[in-house]
Image: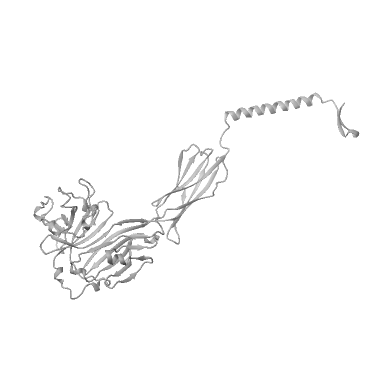
Amino acid sequence: MDVNASTFTAQFSICAHGSCPVLECWFMKEKVSGGLSGGPNQDKSLLYVHKHADSHRAESHDAPLEVNPDRLYFVTDPAATLCHRSLNPRRGSSNKPMCEINPLHPQPSTLELAVPLTEPALSPIYLHADWLSTALQSFDKTMSISAITRAPTGTKEHDVILTLTTKTVLVQSRLGAPVLLDCSFWADPSSPLTGTGFAVEWRYQFRGDGRLVLAYDGKSDRLSHTGEEGATLDFEALHGRGNASLILQEAKVHHSGIYICSVYLPYLQAQVAMELQVVEPPSLSIHPSPLPLTAQGQTINIQCEASGFAPLSLDLHWEFKGADGNTKVLGSGSLSSHRQLWDGTYTQSSRLELDTADLGRAGEVACVGVHPGGTRRVSVEINLIGFSSPSIEDSMAMVGVALVLYGLIKLVSWSFSGSGNNKTSIMWNGGKEKWRFLCG
């Protein structure tokens, strides 16, 4: 769908009678083969939506000047799919739903799954009409709708024949969690195209590669293909309420990508797309932990390991938080290349040569990983010895100790110098088991 489809704003009331909006759309002209294309290939258009056909009063609608009267369409939608509140922004809001209309030419499907839906005996008279295929996205980008409408040839009174809706335009899931990709359809029970059954197909696309995930033949109630382990449908809800949602029992890394839900009726096909992002934040660890006691000025080698994360994008960096509470960013260190693990997740490491000269007495070194799944952090304490010169109190105490030691040394020196000519002898007073010091 063209993002520019939401840019034009007509000067008229955005609500029709009741709760259904007037949808501002771009009508995409068919390219004429051969010759030079003249003029723009799209026209401004309006869809006046009502739940009941008798609510339309075409003569009461005055088209804005910038809209060609031939591009006014009056749509009856009994299921009220096009009346959803997310298609009806508040008056004056700059957020508009996106809407694109394309001419449609019903034809038998060549898909093997849908070929049995087209019966040779079915009269094609019903197909001789004006058909439109309309793609819409809500103004908050949470819902996408594909609608197929039919009008008798030469008229603007359209009836909704088939709508396909998803309310999971973007889904994020943690690794290993169950996933539900929403897709539901409504088909006009009065249309002769709804009596011969339906078919559902889910396809996956990612970076140019695609595969069939699941295919179901509603006419014969047969699951004709399951290309993805753990992918299934709620078949009771599918037949009862048109709920064709895809269920993935356990999200894996390779499930990330675009999913396309297609519903087939005889001669008709509608599809909606949605994106699944399997996001798993990293698990961080620091080595060595704890850090060895280090003298100030030395360099410490620290490594941070980030593992088990997806998708690939990860910002690893280091921080130091000092004892004063201030934080200093140390950079990303030396980063390794990514390695993919057996489960599809990734691992990466960072090596930091930490110069402790200007870090302070103590603090905390942290490895921080910023990832789409969230920010993770792991830290380890660092303690330095030989931090700085002693304080004034410590200096005064050391001076005092030095003076005391100096006095003791002088005292001993004087004692020995005053008695240098005397002789000292030691005698044993055997009877009393005592030593006696005799000075000559």
Question: In the image, is residue 367 above or below residue 189?
Answer: above
Please name whichever residue, 113 or 412, is drawn nearer the observer in this view of the structure. 113
Question: In the image, is residue 138 above or below residue 418?
Answer: below
Residue 278 found in image quarter: bottom left
Q: Quarter holding the C terminus?
A: top right
x, y percent for residue 26: 18, 55
For the point 50% across and 43% down, the residue is: 364
Question: In the image, is residue 430 above or below residue 309?
Answer: above
Q: Quarter holding the N terminus?
A: bottom left
x, y percent for residue 405: 69, 28
Left or right, residue 353 beside residue 210: right
Residue furthest out toward the bottom = 121
On the question of residue 334 being in view, the answer is yes
x, y percent for residue 295: 57, 41
Residue 101 found in image quarter: bottom left
On the question of residue 43 being in view, the answer is no
For the point 13% across and 52% down, the residue is: 67
Residue 297 found in image quarter: top right
Residue furthest out toward the left = 59
x, y percent for residue 198: 25, 69
> Which coloring applies here?
one colour
Left or right, residue 339 beside residue 426: left
For the point 71% across and 25% down, the residue is: 407
Question: In the image, is residue 235 above or below residue 415?
Answer: below
Q: How many dots with numbers?
A: 0
Residue furthest out toward the top = 418
Please name whichever residue, 242 or 321, is drawn nearer the observer in this view of the structure. 242
